Each structure stands twice: as structure tokens, then as C-alpha cells.
Image (spheres, rainbow, N blue to C red):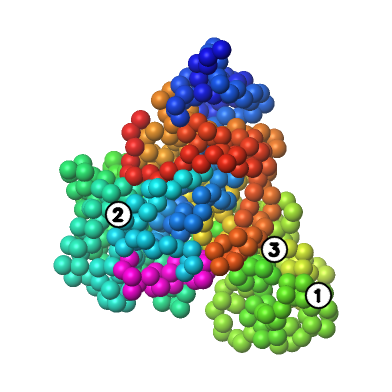
Amino acid sequence: MSSDFDLVIRRGHVVDGSGRPGLDGDVAVRDGRIAAVGQVTGRGAEEIDAKGLIVTPGFVDVHTHYDGQATWDQRLQPSSWHGVTTVIAGNCGVGFAPCRVDDQDRLIRLMEGVEDLPFPVLKEGLPWNWQSFPEYLDSLSGRAFDMDIGLQLPHAALRVYVMGERGANREPASADDIAQMAALAEAAMHAGAMGFSTSRTLNHRTSDGQPTPTLTAAEDELMGIALALGRAGNGEGRGVLQFVSDFADPVAEFAMMRRLCERSGRPLSFSLAQSPVAPLGWRKLLDLLEQATAAGLPMKAQVAARPVGVLLGLDLTLNPFSLHPDWPKAASLDEQRRLLADPEFVARLIANPPAKGNALGTALLHRWGDMYQLGSRPNYEPLPETSLAAQAMRRGVAHEVVAAEWLRDGMIYVPFLNFADGDLAAVGAMLAHADTIPGLSDGGAHVGMICDGSFPTTLLTHWARDRDHGRLPLEHLIRRQAHDTARAVGLADRGLIAPGQRADINLIDLDRLALLPPEVAHDLPAGGRRLLQRATGYRATLVAGQVTYRDGEATGALPGRLLRGATSR
């Protein structure tokens, strides 16, 4: 008997990405597109019973760093374990194209420092079969993935390509430099770049400690590039603008971004988080953003679903004893655990601390009051009384004693953004704001310190289901992570379960949806290790109508491809 559709999902609770209340019904798929929604009478060549499951659009993650991984890997994990069916890479002004042969190591060191991707991994993994940005896109266009991927033109690579050493040393760009960067940016948009990204934060440094080349780029340089995006496409404009900034002077910095958006006509987004240094600064930026959007400007703030936090562990980049002179860096993990169980060794660590004045130790490794045991059921909104410092005080022991015990058992979580108040109330307010979208997951980066590609799962579990107070409607969160993120980067053909839309779909058992603890895998090029995090509860994920994952396991289908620019429905 012939089939009317390639696949029909039956009896699910469809939360379609529009923000409207979900409805029980069916979803039919034909030729990679959604063909019908509601009570579908036709038959599918394959049928999936989704009774008891929610049916959502595939999630769109607009802030990742899969620029390198996409050149050697077909599965963009961990994101694909969390319902993500489209990612945008090339964020924060860092990437690998354009790049002259002599600058390859320079860009690797920048990515190593900014995104914690080890030099040997990138040195062995990157094929470098490109120099220009269009050639980089061409190198990816023949590859198949478990999701779609779009790339932005990174400012640091562009600046070094045009200015060489002057660009790397953050010297001012001349009028000729700006003209060259603008021409290359316009060509990149025509080749299929999703946009242009830049970084203006001191947190972004090369592995040898130098600030990112774009840190102090002047407005005329940024404006020249932004106007080039506005000219692309026969004057209709192409691509988006993405910024990360310290906002040392938030009013002046935002005013500059507003001028860039206004004059170029291109959508602009920026990273927004609560800083422990200025805990209320995010409110001021949202006020300024409201004024801009009220004036009709297409601006958004990208916000995280939970704290931005570092993981410390024996098999990770850092642990609380990394700077101690007596720490046996070269010892095996088993030997390190054995030593940490020895009270005499721990006493020696306490007696011989790192040299005073070490910024890393002060800022991160010895912030005992901000350290929490991650455990087998990760809790990203821990109570202050569960901190390492609080436990040490209750027991009357040194902080290092508790740290040694926790390290033997697993990983230590150190939230450093979005947790200045000891809770996630600020995050809830950001997520609820009309001018924000979920972002900042950094999937594919920070492989030895951060594992936030699971942000979409946190949205559904913590914010829609589990939080004691301040929960947000499931329909609102799914709209934000699917429809709104897609539209923010110019993708109009996905993020919504409606006829004609791309059949990127998740089937989720919301009751069983849960994050598993991060784990370490040694599967990168050159034997490099990375943090990965799985989840339970994703019964199936579809990309272009093909089931790519069932119950968290890859099916072998690889329908994902390189995106070349914006899409229409």
C-alpha cells in the first residue's frame, strides 16, 4: 500500500514554537518538510507513536564554536544530544578564516586561549584546505552532519588577514585597511556567511596572554564592516552582527552598537550576563535595549539559561591545586586520587600554597565560597549553604581538605557569571524579557573547563518544570529556543511546526527529561580530551525529516548541511 507521507508522528502534544498553548495532534512529514499538522488521516511510510510526549521544533543554538570540530567530525556533540538541530558558529570574533598560511598558528593560539581548544588538537585536526572565507565555506559544503551549521565571519581572523602583525597588535586600522576588511566582509556574506562577529572583552586572550586583536577596534573600523553587510545583496543587506563586550562604559558602548545597527540596517545581538563586579549592570543594558527596540531597531541580547560556570577536576584543564608547587601534574589520575586520600599529602599542600598575587588562583581556583559539588544529578542553582566554604566551616576543617575529597569523587562547579545573588533570579528576568534570546552555550569550545551545550535542556527542565518559584511557560521557552533564535539569525524556514517549515523536530518525554553529569572523553584529534554531557528524555530528534537520534543514540543519519546565508519559508 502506498504512503501519503514519509513519516507521521501520532498523538503527540504539539508545542509548535509559536508561543501558543500546545495542542494534541499529529505531524506529517514529506520531502524533509512539514506537510500537515493536526488530525492527519493519511498514512506515513514510517509512523511514530508520540502519546505522552511533547513534540517541539528542533532547537536553534545561535552561539557555538564548532568552527574546528565541523572540519573533522560529523556529529556536533554535545549539542545534538540536547535537541539542537541548527547551530551558528564563528562567534566572539574568533575562527579560522580568512587565514594566510603563515598565520595559522596565530589563529590556533587565539582559539586555544579564548575557547580552551588545545593547540595540538587544532594543529592536527584542521585540514587548512582554505585561505579565504569563501574557501572555508566550500571546504565544509561537501560535508554531512547530524544538524545544520552556519558560520559567521570572525573579526580577529579578518583583521589579521588584512593587517598582519599590526592587526594582531591592535594597532588602529587605516582607511585602506577598513576598505579591504569591508570588501572581504561583503564577499563573505555573498558566499554564505551568516554574519560578522567581534569581541571587545579582556577575558578573550591568546594562549600566551595577549588580548584578542579586536579588543580596541575603533568605531570607524566596525562601522565600515557593518555598512558592508548593509550593502550586500544588491543593497538589501545580508548577515547579522554579533558582539561580546565588557561594557566598561555601558552607555557609550551600547550607543556605538546602536549606531552600527541603525546605519547598517543589520540585526545585532550582544552577550548579556550578570557580572559579580556590577551585579545590576544587566538591568541598565536591558533598559537601553528596550529603548532601541522601541525605536524599531532589530537588536537582541543573548542570555544564558543558567550560570556561566567552570568545571574543575583531575582530568580537566584546572583543579584547585593546579598552582600548588607540590601538585604532581605528571602523575596518573589514579595516583592523584591516591595522594588526595593521604592526609599528610593534603597537609603538605596546605602548608605550601601557591605564591601570593597569582590572579588565576585569586579569581577562580581558591574561590571556596563559590565552589559546589556537581554530583550525579547536576544542580546548577545550588544553595549557598552547600558551598565548599560552608561545608568546611561546619566541619571545622581547611578548605583544601574538602576540596581534596570532592576532587576524588568528581567535578567541582564554580559559577562565575549570573550567580552574584546566590540564585538565578536575574537569569529568570533575562529569559522572560521580550528582547532576549537564549544563547552563550559555547558548544564545541572550552572543552576542558565548561560544558554548556546542554543549555536547551536546562531551559525545559529547570525553568519550565523543576524550579520552586519563577518558572516560565513551556511554550514561551520553546518559542525562544526555536522560533526566536532562528529568526534572529535570518532563518525563516525552521523553528516552527507548521506546514512548509523544515521538518526539524524533537519528541521529548518531559517527565524523564534530565541532565546527566558531564563526562570526559578522549576522542579529539591528537588524543585530546573534552567535556561532554548527555541527557535522558529525548525520545527522538529529526533533522530535515530524518531521525538522527533515538533515546540519545545516533541512528547514522546525517542530513545536516552547511547553511549559506539566510533562508526564506
- Dot 1 or dot 2, earlier in sequence: 2
Question: Could you say where residue 219 lies in the image, as x and y percent from the top left?
Answer: 25, 63
Can residue 106 be found in the magenta stretch?
yes
Circle 3/circle 1 CB separation < 8 Å: no
The amino acid type of the residue labelled 1 equals Arg
- Dot 2 or dot 3, earlier in sequence: 2
Q: Is residue 497 above or below residue 449?
A: above
Q: Magenta residues, as a range?
A: 99-121
Label 1 – label 2 distance at C-alpha: 52 Å
Determine whether, in the image, residue 504 is placed left or right of residue 12: left
Question: Could you say where residue 442 lies in the image, as x and y percent from the top left?
Answer: 50, 56
Q: Quadrant of the N terminus?
A: top right
Residue beneath label 2, please? 134
Q: Is residue 254 above or below residue 59?
A: below
The amino acid type of the residue labelled 2 equals Pro
* Circle 1: element type: helix
State the residue in front, 435 or 316: 316
What is the quadrant of residue 459 in the picture?
top right
Label 2 – label 3 distance at C-alpha: 41 Å
